[in-house]
Image (cartoon, rainbow, N blue to C red):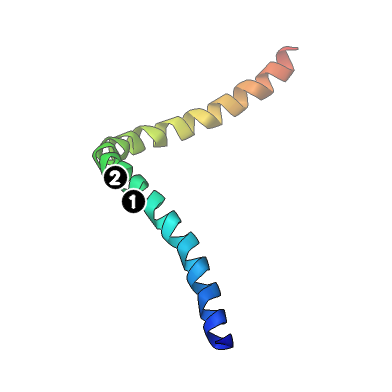
Amino acid sequence: VRTLGLYSAQIRTLGLYSAQIRTLGLYSAQIRTLGLYSAQVRTLGLFSAQVRTLGLYSAQDCTLGLYSA
């Protein structure tokens, strides 16, 4: 019974994990809908490369802002 007590403690912790798995089931439904958006995000990835280069320019704008002051 003492060894069963240890197993029952593990089963209780598994009960906590099963609750998380159920909530993950809700997220997986959202991830499937995000799969449709991921195709759009890939095309946005091409634009993000341009935005990164713009980020370099914006860093220069900040330094230019210091010079203008």
Residue 65, position in %: x, y?
Answer: 68, 17
* Residue picked out by circle 2: 29
| Residue 9 position within the rendered picture, expressed as x and y whole percent measured from the top left | 55, 73
The residues tagged by marks 2 and 1 sit, at their Cα atoms, a distance apart of 7 Å
User: Residue at 54% of width from left, 26% of height from top?
Assistant: 57
Q: How many marks?
A: 2
- Asked if residue 69 is positioned above or below residue 21 in the image, the reply reads above
Q: Are marks 2 and 1 in contact (CB under 8 Å)?
A: yes
Quadrant housing the C terminus = top right
Q: Report crowding for label 2: few under 14, some 14 to 19, many 20 or more residues within 10 A (C-alpha).
A: few
Name the residue: 32% across, 45% down.
Answer: 31
Disc 2 marks a residue whose amino acid type is: Ala
Quarter of the picture containing the N terminus is bottom right
Residue 42 vertical position relative to residue 11 in the rendered view, above or below: above
Instruction: Name the kind of residue labelled 1 in the image.
Output: Gly
Q: Secondary structure at mark 1?
A: helix
Left or right, residue 54 beside residue 60: left
Residue 59, image x, y percentages? 61, 28
Question: Which residue occupies 41% across, 32% down?
Answer: 50
Horizontal side, residue 25 vs residue 3: left or right: left
* 59 w.r.t. 65: above or below: below
Name the residue carrying label 1: 25
Q: Residue 21 appears in which quarter of the rendering?
A: bottom left
Q: Residue at x 68, y 24 (%)?
A: 63
The secondary element bearing badge 2 is classed as helix
Q: Nearer the viewer, residue 15 or 48?
A: 15
Residue nearer the viewer, 38 or 30: 30
For residue 21, side relative to residue 7 (left or right): left
Residue 33, disc? none
